[in-house]
Amino acid sequence: MASNATLPSLPTKAQEVDSPATKAASSSLPTNGTKAQEVESPAKKDGPQNVQRRLVTVRRVTSSTYLNSNYDLITIDGWKVVVKRTKGIVEGDWIVFLEADCFVPAHGRFAKFERLFAEIGELSTYDGVEGYRVGMSTWRDHQGKQVVSQGHVFALREFPHIEDKVFELRWERSRTHTDEQFLNYLRTLDFRNGLDVMKWESPDDNNDNTQQQQLTVTTFPKYPHFILKPDMERVQNCPNLFLKPKYRTYLFQESVKLDGASMTVYFLLPTNPSYSHLPTLPALSPASILTHPLLQHAVQQLGRFGVCSRKHDLVPHLISQATTPAQHIYWAAALAAKLHVSLPAGAAAGEHGSGSIAVQGELVGAGIRGNPYGYAKGEHEFVIYAVYDVDRRKRWDPRKVVEFAERIGVRHVPVRGYHRIWDVARNHEDLVVRAELRNAEGLVWKNVLDGRWFKVLSSRWVLEK
């Protein structure tokens, strides 16, 4: 563990922020229509249901306010987007919303919309495809106050094939859904296929050139399907936080979202049904250990130990023979934290409940995201923020995770405190203001009752990236 690096030092209580509440708008819904191509919704499968980021959604404009002589600032659920007044988008209108990090191809099936797509910004190339990347931008209103705009908005009528699909869906659900229920249903659908939108992504997990080169030239197995991914919904996509009374009483842990690379470390007992789905490893022998030293930690008497990046299971025998554990930062961080010892020991002692668990956190240090915490060259650290019970398919209570981290001697992400959201914020904007931290991506709010969580990204951090 690196002892000289400085993680964010934060108070346990934050000053309350006062800002006006956002007024919800009402609008009539379409009532019938014709057939159109299908949309994408989260698929059900044998395993935990991961967060599916919906890049292109159909929503309703909650409010519209004057920004300056040429532009308005519209609110869509928790999102703020600047639009040209000449587009004629007003409160109550139905729109197609493209979240930040959408990449819209300029050519192909929907080339006829290229004139519209050009509104997004300059033409660029991603993964060999020419198109437009949707991002964030800063503006000044007529009073000189800074405004952050996220995503891009088109009027629903500008894409007739998507509008037809919305009409069709509304007609199908006219007897079972109220207007509000249908609006909530639409939020669950991703219309990205309706525009061939891709998700723009930076390199896999970190920007260390040597490590990234190793991860990309080796074909590692995919992230285990039976472990819930640590992906989180953005607060802007949680419109009910300040509408439904139940959120007045729920207790949440407020913690800092570190600027690092996602990392998961698991220990699985043979009694777990998913054990047979683990990637096959070479048989453990003196010769195989000599060739692949990490095998001795992966294949254990009680079960299987593994280390994952955000997308891959980094099985030890696929790591280059020229790469020692000290040079492979994911495995090195896991071994430095002695997780290969504490997880099997905890399973044997019955300290982990079922015994099969996945510990999730941020890998921080030299060469990762610009090393904002000042680790020395070659130093890295695994910092815990969640534990997933693989047998029960649920996350631990976040308070239990803090105790677990203390017991095994591994740092937990900084916890600011435990709050009922309505006690510290009155709307989404208040939460965004709280997230403007130094050396961090923002804040994470975890429900202690059911483990559900969402993130509030710092506008400063997003703009810098």
Image (cartoon, rainbow, N blue to C red):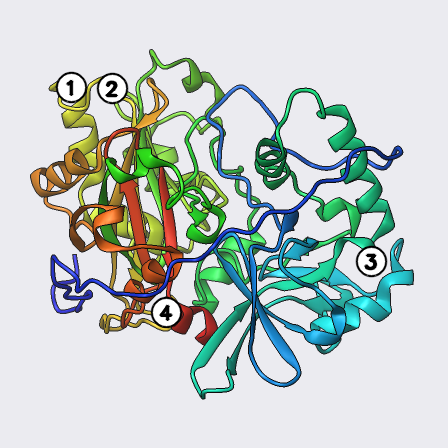
How packed mark 4 is, by other alpha carbons closer than 10 Å (few <14, some 14-19, many 20 or more), is many
State the residue position of label 2: 302
Q: Which of marks 4 and 3 is nearer the N terminus?
A: 3
Q: Which mark is residue 158?
A: 3
Q: Tell me the CA gap for discs 3 and 2.
A: 59 Å
Whether tag 1 and tag 2 are in contact, CB under 8 A, the answer is yes
Q: Which mark is residue 367?
A: 4
Q: Could you tell me which quadrant the N terminus lies in?
A: bottom left
Q: In this view, does 299 lie to the left or right of 108?
A: left
The residue at the point 75 percent across, 70 percent down is 87
Q: Which of marks 1 and 2 is in front?
A: 1
Q: Where is residue 461 in the image (x, y as percent from the top left)?
A: 40, 70
Q: Tell me the CA gap for discs 2 and 4.
A: 35 Å
State the residue position of label 1: 348
| SS under mark 4 | loop
Q: Which of marks 3 and 2 is nearer the N terminus?
A: 3
Q: Where is residue 180 in the image (x, y as percent from the top left)?
A: 57, 36
Q: In the image, what residue type sits under mark 1?
A: Ala
Q: In this view, does 346 lie to the left or right of 442?
A: left
How packed mark 3 is, by other alpha carbons closer than 10 Å (few <14, some 14-19, many 20 or more), is few
